[in-house]
Each structure stands twice: as C-alpha cells, then as structure tokens.
Amino acid sequence: MIIGTAGHIDHGKTALLQALTGQAGDRRQEERLRGITIDLGYLYASLGEPDLTGFIDVPGHERFVHNMLAGACGIDCVLLVVAADDGVMPQTREHLAIVELLGIRRALVALTKIDRVEPSRIAEVQLQVEALLEAGPLCGAPILPVSSVSGEGVDALRAQLLEQASEVRARREDGHFRLSIDRAFSVTGAGVVVTGTAFAGRVKVGDELSLGPSGRRVRVRGLHAQSQKAHEAKAGQRVALNLSGERLSVADIRRGDWLVTPELHAGSQRIDIEFTLLPSETRELRHWTPVHVHLGAQDVTGRIALLEGECLAPGGHVHVQLLLNAPAHAVHGDRVVLRDQSAQRTLGGGRVLDPSAPPRNRHRQARLAVLRALAGDTLEDILPGLLPSALNGLDPALLERQFNRPRQTWQLPDDALEIDTRLGPRLFERGTWDYLGQSLVAALQRFHETQPDELGPDRDRLRRYALPQLERPAYLALLESLLAVGTIEASGPWLHLPGHRVRLSEEEEALKARLWPLLEAARFNPPWVRDLASALNVEEERIRHLLRKLSRIGELQQVVKDLFYPDATIRQLASQVLDMERQSGVIRAAAFRDQIQLGRKRSIQLLEHFDRIGLTRRFGNERKVRRDSALASDTELR
C-alpha cells in the first residue's frame, strides 16, 4: 500500500510520519532551514505486515500544491492531517478536494497536536472535520487524535493503517507497464535513476521502455520496489528504475514524464474527459478558459473546450476536451485535476474518457453519444454501447492502448464481429455490419434503375454513391464479403447485381464484330475513333456511342477521349507495370515507354489512366502500385 499525506502547512504531516515509522525522511537543506516541506518526501516502513508500506509526504503550502498533486496521483490511502489548534484551514479544504477528484476513496484523518489543546477543543475540531467530510465520498472516515510528541494515539493510527492495507484492492497487473516519473537523479557508478508509482502492469530488469513524449527507448538496468532491490516490480508499488539509453542524462527527464511499454506509447494533445467544476468556485467556468492540467505527476498548460454549452456553473458536470500545449500520456479512467491559469486555485477535475480525442466534430451529438458510452468502468461495460455507433468499426489496437487492456484479456459481446480489412482487423456490431451490406445492395439497385445503360459503377464510384461516410478499408472488406457470396458481381472493374446486364442491339453486335479485330490487332496502340470510323466507313458518332457502351459493359476501358483499349489489353499492360515495380520498386514513365515501345505521350496517358482506376499512386515523377486496387489483385491472381 502507498499512503500519502494531505493537509494545511504546519499541521504536523512530516512529524507524524516520523512518529509512525521511526524515520526522519528525506529532508532537503532548504526544508530544514525553513521548517516546512517544499517538495515530495518518501519513507518506507513496515506497519506490521510482511511488505513495506510506502509513505509520500506532500507539502502543505499553497505555493506548492503542484508538488502535492505530483505525489498524490498514485496513492491508495490518504492520511488527512488536521492540527487540533488550527482546525480546518484553506489547504485542508483544497487538498481534500484534490483527493476526491483523484478518485481516492480510502482515508484516515489524523487530528494532530492534541498535546497543545484542551479536550473540548479536540471535540470541536472533530465536529469541524466531520462536517467537512459529510457531503463527500470520504464521509465517515475514521478520525484519530494523535500527538507526534508524546506518541499518544500513534499505535491506534498505525493499527488503522494496517487494517486499510489489508483491504486495499490490488491494481491490475495484466495491462502494459506505465509509471509517472516524480524524481530523476544520477547515482555515481549507476547512472540515471527515476522513481514513481507504477500505475499498471509489471516491469523487470532488461525490459525496454519508452520515455517521455518523444518515446525515446531506454532499458532497465536495475530496479528497486518499495525501497528494496528486486528483479521485478508491479502495479501499486513505489519503483526506482536505473535506466540506460544512448546519451541519456538526467537533464533529458522531467517530472511528469511517463515511462511505458512501447506498445502503450502514444502522446496526445487532445483529451476528452468528464469534468466536474468544484461547488466552492465563486463564478462559472467559460469555454476556452486557460488552465493547468495535472495528469499523473505531469503539469501541462492548455485550454478547456466545453462540449455542451458556453459556460458551466459551480458544481456542474459536463463533457469537455482538453487542448494541451504539450503531449501527455493517458488511458481511459485516469484522473485529471485542473487548476486556474495562475496555478493559485483548484477548479475541478474528472476522468479521462478518450486519451486521443478527434480534432473535429467534437460538439456533434454523435460524438457526445460516444462519450456517454465511454462512461463505463471497464472495456466489457463499454463495448455494448460503443459498437452500435461505430459505423467504421473499432480498431482493436487503439482500444488496447486507450484502455491499457491487452487483446487476449478481452471478453467481446456476443453480437460483435471481427472483420479483417487491409489495414488490420476492425470490430463491428453484427447489426451494423448487416445494415451496411443492405445499404450497399440497395444503392446498387438504385444505380441500375437510374443508369440502365451502364453495367455498374467501379468500386470507388459505388462507395461515393452508396456509403461515402465509410472508410475505404472497411468498405472494401464489406464489398469483398458481398462478392464472395454472390450478392454483388463484378465484370471487369464494374460492379452490378446478379442478372443485371447491358445488352447490345443486333445492329450494335454486327458493328462490334467488324471493329473488334481492329482493336485487338493493334495491341498496345489501338486506333482512335476517327480512324475506326474511316476504316469501316461508319459515322464517328455511331462508333463513339458503341465504344462507350462497351466500356460500360466492361469489355473496353477508355484511356482518354476517343481512345479505347480492350480490357484484356489493359490487363496485359497492368501485368507489366506490376513486374516493373517488383523489379525496381517504382514505375518510371521513361522505363514504361521503352518497355511497351510507344511514344512518350501515349505512355503517360496510360499511366495516368492507371492512376485514375486505382492501380497506381503517383509520387512526384514516380509511381507505386496500390495493393488494395481491384485491378492489381485480379491481375496478380491471373
């Protein structure tokens, strides 16, 4: 268990810990001279249990609340210290508010300095504390009068802390390791050492981790858990890690930097949270207010964007997006505390819902519905409400990072489908997937009704026509599933419903029989419309009309106006393009021209046609094959 103190300055927090543990703690020279705690102090002692208990001593001065927040972020139980002579003071209230915002639900109240006051004063302050806790989640917390000088009440407090330790629920160890650094220093002969509370997972000597916003790779050379040398540490422990990395120094590390497994690293400057403004605030909070955001041990500035209205009254609860001035690491469920721009008072706080929030459409009802679905505590609670609104499916890799839940620990809802796309698997609700398929078929039917002379659209045109809101990887997976069962058929690049055909009249069939040998005989250099009309002694418009109809059927492809290639010839050219990329990695117009032995202009026209139909993608003067294109897949299969 990790116990953290809280309370007003000079209420005896440091002296109480010394009385409890028999240790003076890590006091800095400036702190000894001034007689106050300025930064975090750490102690490790046994309360009677087999494992050592970690104690974090926080400063009580209002100027050092940011340090108090850095220490309070990882504690299991708070020891709220109130001096019997002073009673409840401003930082008592502020520290209590911070503890509640951080979601800490175990607390003991130590009523210190009872040797300085009369019994009646002790009873009076006890009533003050009870009234302070009454409206909050820590109502009913035990209040124990103690004297650090005489030792009165210390044994009773130690016994209560031991009872709390037996009831503390272990943190999840099945997630990826994450630790928020609160100290970094150099040790002679060892190098860089960082300390912090392990929020999740396990870490052992030899592991590789990602450090800070940049994700710099470091390796664990050695570690201590709860101040004892160990080979492995786990969630809930105070951990000291000896790190090694290329040119790594203490100057590269700041308080608040995160140390995480590489799979979990993903810094974000937009975080969606559910936020509560403290009832003690005297005025409403306005949209776009500048704030200090405390997340783990990190303190970063930013602005708060209200997603439901332009202002929030004291005590109000609303969804907000935090726009940070520097990247931060978070996962679903992390606690956030917000302070004002000058860092002089605590405004409120909340819980992280989406640590990688989208930059657009954050006010839309659909987005707010997603945030409401994310209000659950576990992934299993959230998925049934989240899947129906996920039109493009959910990316398991992003969910794993968002919730810090490795894929093998999930329990999916019965109606969840895992669909393989060309960019990896996606999770869909079965009803949503069926609805998308029905919508695609219905749209293709409408297309046939409005364009009876066309065999059908190509893949990208059908997507724009039917499901423009569906991302391409999901759309292609949907289309391929319908093609596989025969609900939709393909003739060349054209898609159509089974049985739908564009028919040629007898006259058109006769004209086709005359011109087709001319197209095939010319191979890579077919005649233009005017040349076909001249050779067959037929009006240009009749030839043009027939060739366009044949292109809609899928037997021809129009490269430029009045220049048509048989589909089989285009596939031969596509095969040469694929071979060229396999050999050299890219497609160059000059090399393509030499290979097909055509002029420069015609070669470029063909390559631009391949760009349009999705076979290639242009990068400057070079091209690469798009492996998700229908033509590339079909040609490679052949």
Image (cartoon, grey):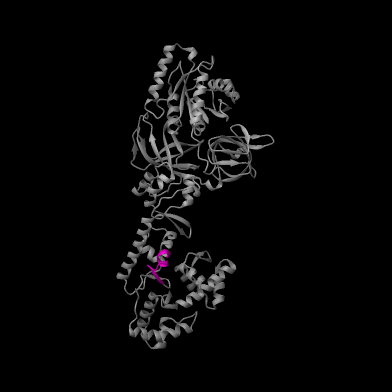
Vertical relation: 162 (above or below) 534:
above
Q: Position of residue 291 (x, y in %)?
A: 43, 36
Q: Is residue 300 left or right of residue 251?
A: left
Q: Nearer the viewer, residue 248 or 11?
A: 11
Residue range highlighted in magenta: 480-490
Q: Position of residue 109 (x, y in %)?
A: 46, 23
Query: Relative to 489, does residue 32 appear above or below in the rendering?
Result: above
Tell which residue pokes out farthest to the right in this image. Answer: 189
On the picture, is 241 further left or further right than 567?
right
| x, y percent for residue 347 | 41, 32
State whether residue 396 appears in this view.
yes
Which corner quadrant of the image does residue 140 belong to?
A: top left
Q: Is residue 35 visible?
A: no
All told, the count of numbered labels is: 0
Answer above or below: position of 509 versus 225.
below
Examine the structure image and report whether residue 39 is included in the region drawn in magenta: no
Q: Quadrant of residue 560?
A: bottom left
| Along the viewing direction, whichever of 590 and 373 lies nearer the viewer | 373
Residue 51 at what x, y percent from top left? 57, 30
Q: Quadrant of residue 90?
A: top left
Please tell me whether residue 580 is drawn above or below residue 154 in the rendered image: below
